[in-house]
């Protein structure tokens, strides 16, 4: 199979009664288009087109899949279709709305509301570049993630997991709504195949169990990613990957620098969500919501001179043991 990325559908292509306007985004598992419905209303259409399994020549409609990869392609196709069916049953302002889903051209298309705005990732990068002591105000973080958790709780109640929560998949609309986008059911299914070795998840936001084929995933897996997103909103960068944390965990040092900038209770929420042991995290979104909403219990620790010196020394020692490299930006969407 050629490593050349499959060609997107050209403008004015008609699929399922929708007319493609242009490609909006593309990743390892599909292509997203801006399209118009029969009433000329804008919609977003996501096409299942895993670049590691399929290719497509320019101007063609159907993907080409090698015979030895056909069963895996169909497995992901089935999961993508079931994801569309499940999401279509969810109606919540913080979860992307699936309006329709259909099979055509030997693949599956998912039709969603077209959202105008920007990803949380873009806001983080912009705020970080202002070089202030805090990337976002605590009240903003609590309000934003309260909104996201309301939607995620509904998702979990429908026996679904998101599995790829990250700032690039939290969309802030022009009317200031926060929406979870780009669910990963097909991604999760394909990751379980022994002959499928591409990295499935976004470094820094993926829980430790997502790196092991035999580990159970559940609400606690999405909750780890929520903690990592809050961390990115506080620090401006993603946390270290879970395997690196298991060898040398720098999260407590980094969060320690924020004592007095953010409340102890918010810092403790992040540490709780990002526990390496899945059983040490909140086991449900409801548990996390209760803790995040404790408005009256915020504490801001003022560090003594001795504590500040110790923290600075710890940081210097830790930094001296790692090779010099530029800080990694918040991971971009695949």
Image (tube, rainbow, N blue to C red):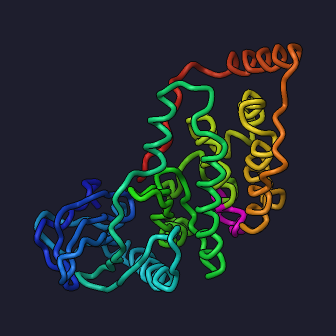
Specify the segment rendered in magenta. Answer: 210-222
Q: Position of residue 258 (x, y in %)?
A: 72, 31
Q: Position of residue 90 (x, y in %)?
A: 52, 81
Q: Which residue is located at x 72 percent, y 31 percent?
A: 261
User: Which residue is at the front of the view, 76 or 95?
Assistant: 95
* Left or right: residue 254 compared with residue 102: right
* Left or right: residue 204 compared with residue 86: right
- Whether residue 317 is visible, yes or no, is yes
Q: Which residue is located at x 73 percent, y 34 percent?
A: 255
218 in magenta: yes
User: Which residue is at the front of the view, 288 or 48?
Assistant: 288
311 in magenta: no
Count of numbered tags: 0
User: Which residue is at the front of the view, 195 or 152?
Assistant: 152
User: Which residue is at the front of the view, 317 or 35?
Assistant: 35
Q: Residue furthest front?
A: 296
Q: Which residue is located at x 64 percent, y 62 percent?
A: 222
Q: Position of residue 93 (x, y in %)?
A: 50, 71
Q: Position of residue 245 (x, y in %)?
A: 71, 40
Looking at the figure, which quarter contains the N terminus? bottom left
Indicate whether 236 appears above or below 272.
above
Indicate whether 326 appears above or below 62.
above
Indicate whether 333 appears above or below 94.
above
- Whether residue 71 is visible, yes or no, is no
Q: Which residue is located at x 13 percent, y 71 percent?
A: 60
Question: Based on the displayed image, in which of its 4 quarters is residue 44 positioned?
Answer: bottom left
Question: Based on the displayed image, in which of its 4 quarters is residue 12 positioned?
Answer: bottom left
């Amino acid at each position: 199979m050629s490593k050349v990325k499959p060609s997107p559908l050209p403008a004015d292509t008609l699929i399922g009664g929708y007319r493609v306007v242009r490609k909006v985004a593309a990743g390892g598992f599909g292509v997203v288009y801006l399209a118009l419905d029969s009433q000329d209303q804008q919609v977003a259409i996501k096409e299942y087109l895993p670049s590691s399994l399929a290719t497509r020549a320019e101007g063609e409609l159907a993907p080409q899949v090698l015979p030895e990869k056909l069963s895996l392609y169909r497995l992901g196709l089935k999961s993508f279709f079931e994801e569309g069916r499940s999401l279509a049953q969810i109606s919540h302002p913080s979860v992307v709305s699936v309006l329709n889903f259909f099979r055509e051209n030997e693949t599956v298309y998912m039709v969603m509301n077209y959202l105008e705005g920007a990803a949380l990732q873009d806001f983080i990068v912009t705020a970080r570049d202002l070089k202030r002591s805090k990337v976002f105000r605590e009240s903003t973080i609590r309000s934003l993630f309260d909104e996201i958790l309301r939607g995620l709780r509904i998702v979990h109640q429908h026996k679904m997991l998101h599995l790829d929560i990250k700032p690039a998949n939290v969309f802030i609309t022009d009317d200031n709504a926060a929406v979870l986008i780009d669910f990963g059911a097909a991604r999760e299914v394909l990751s379980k195949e022994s002959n499928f070795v591409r990295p499935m998840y976004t470094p820094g936001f993926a829980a430790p169990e997502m790196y092991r084929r035999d580990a159970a995933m559940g609400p606690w897996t999405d909750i780890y990613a929520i903690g990592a997103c809050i961390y990115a909103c506080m620090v401006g960068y993603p946390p270290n990957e879970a395997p690196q944390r298991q060898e040398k965990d720098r999260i407590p040092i980094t969060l320690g620098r924020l004592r007095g900038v953010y409340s102890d209770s918010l810092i403790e929420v992040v540490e709780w969500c990002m526990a390496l042991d899945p059983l040490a995290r909140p086991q449900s979104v409801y548990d996390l919501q209760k803790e995040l909403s404790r408005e009256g219990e915020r504490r801001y620790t003022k560090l003594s001179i001795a504590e500040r010196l110790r923290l600075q020394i710890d940081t210097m020692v830790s930094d001296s043991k790692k090779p010099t490299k530029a800080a990694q930006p918040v991971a971009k969407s695949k």
